[in-house]
Image (tube, rainbow, N blue to C red):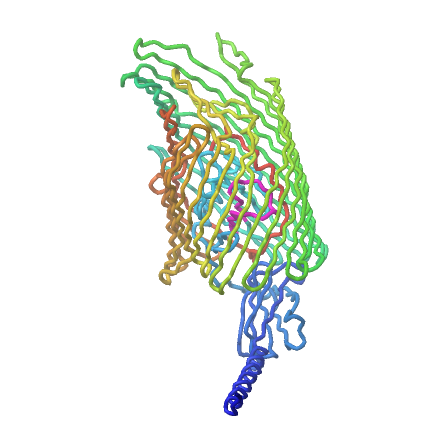
Amino acid sequence: MYHKTSFTMYNKLAYLLIALLINTNLLAAKDNNIKGKIIEKENGKALPYATISVQDNNLKIIGGTTTNEEGQFTINNIEIDSFMVKISFIGFKDTTINVNMDNLTDNNLGIIALSPDASTLKAAVITEKIPVIEQKVDKIVMNVSEAVSTQGSSTLDILRKAPGISVDPSGNILLNGNIVQIWIDNRPSNLTGADLEALLSSTDGSTIDKIEIIAHPSAKYDAEGSSGIVNIKTKRNFAKGLSGSLRATYGASPFESELYNSVSSSINLAYRGNKSNTTVTYSPKFDESYDKFTSVTNLDEAQMLKGITLNKYINKRFNFKVSHDYYINKQNIIGVIISGLNRKNDENTDNDITGSKLYKNGTLIKTINTSIDGKSNFNNIYTNLNYTHIFKDNHEVTVNADYGYYDIGSDSHQENKYFNVIEGTDDPSNIFNSYSRQYLNIVSTKLDYEQLVLNKIMLEVGGKWAQSQTDNNLKREDFIDNVWVKNNLLSSKFNYKENIVASYISAGIQFGPKLSAKAGIRAEYTISDGDWISADTMTQKKYLDIFPTLFFGFNPNKNTTIAATYNLRIQRPNFSQLNPFRIYVDANTAVEGNPNLLPQYTHQASLSLIYKHFLSLGFYGQFNTKSIIQNTKFNSVTGEKLLIWENFGNLNLYGGVLNVTELPVTKWLTINSGLLVAQVKSKTDGYEKKSLFSSINMNAEFSLPKDTKIELSGIFQSGIPYGFFKVKPQGDISLGIKKGVLNNRGTLILNCSDLFLTQNSRAVLATDIIENYRFKSQWKSREISISFLYHFGNGIATKARKVGESEEAKRAESDNAKK
C-alpha cells in the first residue's frame, strides 16, 4: 500500500540524487587534464625535462610538471577552463600559450616547438638535482654524470658500481652473475672479454651521461646476451657553437712492494650548427699493470703441485669516436659514426717468482721456472651509416648499415726450465714460440619501423641481416737441438663464417591510466660454417630460433608500480671460444676453443614492485640450458691442465632482489643500496651442485660545503657454483672525493679503488672425481688516482638517436689478451 509520506520521501531522495549528479558533473567539468609534446624547432628532436607551468589570469601558478624522455607531458586537475601554459628550458626562449579548454581536441595542446636562445644559454646554471639511480619499470637508470666518482674514473670503474654488475677475470661484464651485452649509444660495443675491458677502461667516465641496465629487452633488441643489455649513453650537445672537456689523470697501484703507474687523458669536443651536430672523443692511456695467478693441484694423496705466475704488462692504447648528424629538415636525418681502438701490449713474467714446484709427501722434488715474453695488439675500426625519416609524431623509420674490421695478433716466447731437486740436475728444457693472428670482418644492415596505431598501440616491426667472417692462424715452433721446428700438432688454421637473418614484431598498448602491456616475437635464422683446415674438419650448423617477450605493468596508484616480464634469450659462442687454438698461459696451463660449441639459451621471468621510484622489490628466475663454460681437463701424473670451452648443462638461478635508490638520510647524506639473494644450481649428467648466493652493494654520498662531495661505495658477493667450479666470495670498498674549482668549470678528483685489495677471483673444482685443484687470480684492482677535469663551452646532455645497432662483433674476443 502506497503511503504519501513514503512517496514524498522518495521524491526528496530522488531530487537530492539528481542535484548531487548535477553538481558532480559541474565539478568534473572543471577537473581538466591537458597533454602535449615539446620539441626543438630546428630539428624536431624531443626535449626531455622541459618545465611546464599552468598560470591563471592573475599569473598565479596552479599546476605544473616536466616532460619525460620523449618530450611528452600531462597535467591533471586544472579547475578552470581558461589559463596560460608556460614552457621553459635552458638555452631556449620561454614560450607562453593561452588555452581555452573549449577549443582543444582531446585536451591535447599538440606539438610545441621551442626556439634556441643563445643569450640566456651563456648565463644558464642547472640547479635541479637528477637522481643518481632511477628505478623504472623496464630498467634501472644510473645518471652517472651526477655521481662523484664519474670524473677521474673510467667507464669500467663506473660499471663496477652499478646495481648487480660485476666483472669476471676475463673482462666479461656480468649482471647477477650472467654475461650481458654492452651497448654504447644504442648500438653494441662489438667487443667482449679483455678487449671490451680495454675499451671501457680507456673511456673517460666524464663523457658518460647515463647507464641503462635492461634485464628484459623487448623483441626489438637482438636476442643475444643471456642476462640482457647494459646501454651506455654518452653526453650529446645541443648548444650552438663549440663545447667540450679536457681531462688528465695520474694513477698509482701498489702491489707487493712495487708501484705500477698509469697516465691517461681525454679530449671531448662537440660542435653544433644550425643543421648539424658533431662530436669527437679521443682518449690515450699508458698503463703499467699486472696479474698474479696462483694454483694448487693435488695430483694424488702424496703429490702436490704449486704454481705461481706473475705477469707484468705495459699497455699503450687509445680509442676514438667521431659522430655527425645532419638534419636535412624536420622529417629527415642522416648520420655517420666512426669509432676505433688501438692497443699494444708488452708482457713479461717475473722470472724470480713465476714457476711451479712439485712436492711429494711434503718434500720438494722438482721445480719448473717459467719465462714468458710476449707482444699483442688489437686494432679495430667500426663505421655506421644511418638514416631516419619521421613521418609524424610516434611514426618513423630508421635504417642502419654497419661495417667492422678487426686485426688481432699475439706473439709469445716461452721457456720452461726443469730442475730435479732430489738429484740436483737440470732436466731438458721446454722452449717454444707461438704466433697467433685473427682477422675479422662484419657487415650488417637493419631496418626499424614504429607507428602509433589507433592512438594507443605502439607497433614496432623490423628486420636485420648480418654476416661475420673470421680467419685464424696459429703457428707453434719448438726449439729442439738448437733448431726451431714447426709443431704441426699444435699449429692450426681455422676459418669461420656466420650469417644471421632476423625479423621481429612488437606491440605495446596502454589500456588505461593503470594498466599497460607489451608483447613481441623475434625470429633469428643462423647459418654457420667452420673450416678447421689443419685438422681437415668441417662443421656446419643451421637453426631457427623464436624468441617471445611479454610485459605487463599495473599502477594501482601514483606511487606504486607492479610489473611482470618474461623473455627468452640466446648466448652464441664468441669467435675465440669456437677457435680450436691452444694458447699456453704458463708451464702447466693452456686454453683451447671448441668449434662444436652450441648456443646457450636463457629463460627469464620476473615480478617486481616499485614504490615512489626509490624502493623496488623483485622476484625473478633465470634458467640456462647448454651453458657455455670452461671445463678443466688435467693429467693427474704431470699436473698439466687444459681449459676447454664446453656446453655444460643447466645453470639455474631464482630469488629476490631489493633496491633502495636515492634514500635521503639527511640533507648531506644520500644512500643507494641493493641486495640480491638467490638459489643457484649447476646440473649436468651425473653432477649437481646448488648453493645460496647473495650480493650486496652500497653507495653513500656526502655533500659538503664549498662544492665538495665524498662518495663511499662497496660490494660483496658470496660464493656461487659455476659449472664444475665453486667460486669463492669477493668484494671491495672504494672512496672518491670531488671538489669544484674555477667557478665549477674545473673539478679536482681523488679516487681510491679496492682499498683493501679484496677484489680477486678464487675458485676450486667442485666435482667428486677431480676435486683437487684450486686457484686465486689477482689483477690491478687497487689504484689511487688524481684527476683534473675542465669543461668549456655550453654543452648539455640530450637524448641520443636510435642508430647504430649492429651487434655481432661483440663476440670478437681474444682470450689470450691480457689486462
Q: Position of residue 117 (x, y in %)?
A: 62, 65
The magenta-colored residue range is 209-232
Residue sitting farthest toward the bottom: 4
Find residue 240 and report its image quarter: bottom right
Q: Position of residue 476 (x, y in %)?
A: 53, 17
Q: Residue at x 55, y 23 (%)?
A: 580
Q: Residue at x 62, y 27 (%)?
A: 496
As for residue 616 lying within the magenta part, the answer is no
Q: Position of residue 605 (x, y in %)?
A: 50, 47
Kindly tell me whether residue 288 is visible in this rendering.
no
Find residue 18 and report its image quarter: bottom right
Residue closer to the observer: 151 or 501 = 501
Kindly tell me whether residue 364 is visible in this rendering.
yes
Is 507 on the left or on the right of 779, as rendered?
Answer: right
Q: Is residue 274 above or below residue 631?
A: below
The image shows a total of numbered marks equal to 0
Q: Residue at x 41, y 10 (%)?
A: 428
Q: Residue at x 48, y 50 (%)?
A: 789
